[in-house]
Image: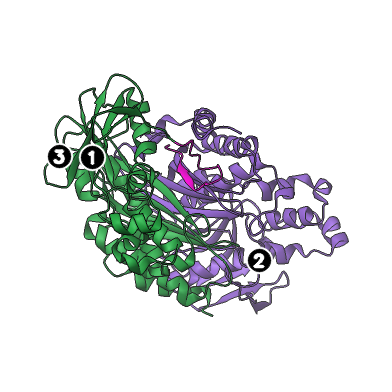
Chain colours: A purple, B green
């Protein structure tokens, strides 16, 4: 077992890899607090927690993946604001059973994400506790006017990056011990991608945005509520896993996963026209009438049934105080 | 039980009290992330966690006190840098047994501290978990060059704010169910004071600083190590609880508590002369020879025995990645 001094030194060394110049770090790990140089833009701040047994099980991913996942899922909130990551703080609650080596693997995963996203891990906290958790605070800069959830205009298109339901599909495979049947989906759940570049491009003209952490319908509802609009979603347009045979075999409904599956960390944006680049799919249209309606492939419309998902309810996970 | 929407609305309403103008909040609770206006100085960042059963027991303090304690203990790291609080993010892991009303009491305590310290709570996260914990990230501005742990010169005086060992004395009373025998000490432990004003004044000329979270000797050791100096501490000068009779009755050694008791959140500074204002007591002198020596009232010197305290050891609590 390392002494506290050795442990901190080891963590500092592992996080020295890939510290981005752009973060403007004046003082990093090793003092009472970290210091970032004054920025020319505002600071965008968010925090996210990953709790063992609630957000993940240890058998679903490696500790290194968990470290990267913690950072990526927190950074997704910056992406949804059209913000550029600068720095992160990691607060880890460690059960006594977690070895130093395991802690370092988790840190290595954070260092992976640090290098990938240009987000310097500048500090943190280690505490004892019964249940492993990683709370990640992220700080970004806002080169454009940040995108909030409000501001959508009736007639705006609803656009989404990437694919919906693929993380939930991967999680179903992991829960059943079948990840190797379609490994890319399990991987999507394990280490999501924060859509930083897409968020930046969207912020050039989008009216509103959110990241899909709780599922399309849930998160779309937040945009509709904040913007006082409704939305019509085109079911045939939803980009979703092309795994019809496997889904059928497992009794999984890919449309349902695309509508309600969480943790994709894709971006939903409301805009008059698509952002530059080909990463966005138009999946619906905002309208004045409140509520979310689903257009079937045959053309008929039905009201979306949104399960009364509550982060503190039976399937509770967590919620931004922003939700 | 409140719905998620109601719960967030209630939390926002409770935190609307005492939001400081000075924080420059552009967007607060209610979106994917919070936004602070660009500051003219650098950002100072720190994070701290309070875990039930590790840092506190519910019978030792009210939830409202716990909310204030979480913010104050995190802000103490900003004080130690000579930094001015701007904003905080609260990440709360809540067991299912905690009622909404109890959660709101905790938030009210954070709102108390928000008003007291001029530190806007601009966001956070709520997650389910087995063990109650509050992870607080604080963001400050640095009007002066921040004080770090390094930079001490041999010959500098060692100064401390307030009293040492009083929180540890209060905690001993709480553990024994005797808080009413000397209520002010229990209160010192429950809701510490972050020494923001003193830190600001000290930063005008101090060479180094740290806050006393782990006990005088532990934290002084960090300054000595970072500054490559030693220190001679004058035992007779230590400001400590004037409760000799009660301490004797309970078998507590007030000198030992002043040397090794944690959670006072007082500031230790190294400086050529005391800061303005009468809040600092000189308790020692830095020297070239490494190590910490204690000068007895009779004049003799002995080497300080510093228990090998490890935040991950048996009496583990937590450590800044800054330690």
Locate residue A144 relative to residue B37 in the image: left or right: right
Q: Which residues are magenta?
A: B307-323
Q: Is the residue A21 above or below the residue A321 in the image?
A: above
Residue A53, label in figure: none
B260 shown above or below A53:
above
- Is residue B123 covered in magenta? no
Q: CA distance from mark 1 to mark 2?
A: 67 Å
Q: Toward which corner of the image does residue B243 lie, by quadrant?
A: bottom left
**Quadrant position of the N terminus of chain A in the picture:** top right
Labels 1 and 3 touching (C-beta < 8 A): no
Chain label for disc 2: A
Front one among B119 and B315: B315
Query: Do marks 1 and 2 both belong to one polypeptide chain?
Result: no
Q: Secondary structure at mark 3?
A: loop
What label does residue B236 carry, if any? 1
- Residue A207 in sight: no
The residue singled out by tag 2 in the image is: A260
Query: Going 57% across and 72% down the picture, which residue do you hit?
Result: B97
Residue at the far top: name it: B288
Q: Residue at x 20, y 24 (%)?
A: B155
Parent chain of label 3:
B
Magenta stretch: dominant secondary structure: loop
Q: Which mark is residue B275?
A: 3
Q: Residues within 10 Å of mark 3 (few under 14, many from 20)?
A: many
| Secondary structure found at label 2 | helix
For marks 1 and 3, the one nearer the N-term is: 1
Subunit ID for the residue under disc 1: B
Q: Where residue B233 appears, x then y in whole percent?
A: 27, 33
**Camera-nearest label, 2 or 3:** 3
Up-down relation of residue A195 to residue B293 (above or below): below
Marks 1 and 3, how far apart at CA = 21 Å
């Amino acid at each position: 077992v390392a002494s506290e001094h050795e442990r901190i030194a080891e963590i500092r060394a592992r996080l020295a890899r890939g510290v981005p110049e752009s973060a403007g770090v004046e003082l990093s790990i090793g003092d009472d607090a970290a210091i970032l140089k004054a920025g020319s833009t505002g600071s965008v701040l968010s925090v996210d927690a990953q709790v063992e047994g609630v957000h993940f099980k240890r058998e679903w991913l490696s500790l290194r993946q968990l470290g990267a996942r913690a950072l990526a899922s927190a950074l997704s909130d910056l992406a949804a604001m059209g913000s550029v990551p600068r720095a992160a703080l990691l607060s880890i609650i460690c059960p006594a059973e977690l070895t130093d080596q395991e802690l370092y693997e988790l840190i290595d995963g954070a260092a992976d994400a640090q290098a990938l996203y240009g987000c310097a891990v500048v500090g943190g906290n280690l505490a004892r506790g019964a249940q492993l958790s990683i709370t990640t605070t992220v700080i970004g800069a806002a080169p454009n006017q940040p995108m909030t959830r409000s501001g959508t205009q009736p007639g705006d298109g609803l656009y989404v990056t990437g694919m919906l339901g693929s993380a939930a599909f991967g999680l179903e495979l992991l829960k059943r011990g079948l990840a190797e049947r379609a490994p890319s989906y399990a991987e999507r759940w394990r280490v999501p991608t924060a859509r930083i570049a897409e968020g930046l491009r969207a912020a050039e003209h989008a009216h509103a945005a959110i990241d899909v952490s709780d599922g399309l319908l849930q998160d779309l509802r937040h945009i509709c509520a904040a913007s006082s609009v409704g939305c019509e979603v085109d079911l045939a347009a939803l980009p979703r896993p092309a795994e019809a045979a496997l889904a059928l075999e497992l009794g999984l409904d890919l449309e349902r996963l695309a509508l309600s599956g969480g943790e994709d960390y894709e971006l939903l944006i409301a805009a008059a026209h698509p952002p530059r680049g080909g990463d966005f799919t138009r999946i619906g249209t905002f309208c004045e009438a409140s509520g979310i309606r689903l257009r079937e492939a045959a053309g008929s419309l039905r009201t979306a049934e949104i399960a009364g998902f509550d982060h503190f309810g039976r399937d509770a996970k967590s919620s931004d105080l922003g939700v």
